[in-house]
Amino acid sequence: MSYVNLTNISLQEIPKICDPEGRGNLSVIEKDVLPFDIKRVYYLYDVPSDSCRGGHAHKELQQFLIALSGSFDVVLDNGKHRRTITLNRPNKGLLIPCGVWRELENFSAGSVCLSLVSEVYQEEDYIRDYDVFRSVVGA
Ligand code: T46
């Protein structure tokens, strides 16, 4: 797992199809939009506004987060620097590579966080101790 430059992580536009007859919008993630094959999909919802999710890094897993509804903040940490990115649009996603500590917080009422990920669930892929994470990335 190598050191990740946080400035390379940014919100990515998801193609949006606006209905010409005013029936609302449709966004689609097709092949080649993501740099990985989706092996798993999960979503967070009914998260109390004072709760924090995440608080770990992944060794291999890459993920793409979308605020399908509402908003929340994603705090990214590479062991040396921190950066907070707010997700609040269903047609923008955040691609998080492996090797980044992440915390999700400030969930608005009714928010839904969709996560598309590159791996099946494996607890061994998680680093849940921040000091261990810092030593693994050489911070
Ligand atoms: C991440 C953030 C955004 C499963 O059994 N299967 C699964 O696919 C997942 C994701 C979790 N679980 C179990 C493991 C725990 O017993 O569900 C419980 C809660 O998981 P965790 O504490 O990891 O939840 P979060 O919200 O802190 O983290 C999750 C993802 O695990 C993580 O990859 O980046 O959402």
Image (spheres, rainbow, N blue to C red):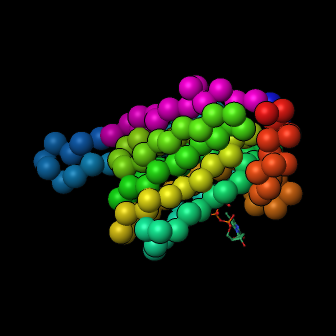
Give the quarter of the figure containing the C terminus: top right
Quadrant position of residue 43: bottom right
Towards the viewer: 53 or 40: 53
The picture places residue 113, in percent across and down from the top left corner, at: 49, 59
Towards the viewer: 16 or 123: 123
Q: Quadrant of ligand 1?
A: bottom right
The picture places residue 61, in percent across and down from the top left corner, at: 73, 46
Q: Is residue 27 above or below residue 32?
A: below
The magenta span reads: 3-16
Side of 40 relative to 33 (left or right): right
- The residue positioned 42% from the left and 45% from the top of the image is 86
Towards the viewer: 65 or 100: 100
- The residue positioned 37% from the left and 63% from the top of the image is 108
The picture places residue 71, in percent across and down from the top left corner, at: 38, 55
Give the quarter of the figure containing the N terminus: top right
Side of 8 relative to 66 (left or right): right
- The residue positioned 35% from the left and 47% from the top of the image is 89
Towards the viewer: 109 or 78: 78
- The residue positioned 69% from the left and 34% from the top of the image is 80
The picture places residue 90, in percent across and down from the top left corner, at: 37, 49
Side of 45 relative to 108 (left or right): right
Number of marks present in the image shown: 0
Is residue 32 something that shows in the picture?
A: no
Is residue 57 something that shows in the picture?
A: yes
Quadrant position of residue 18: top left
Q: Is residue 17 magenta?
A: no
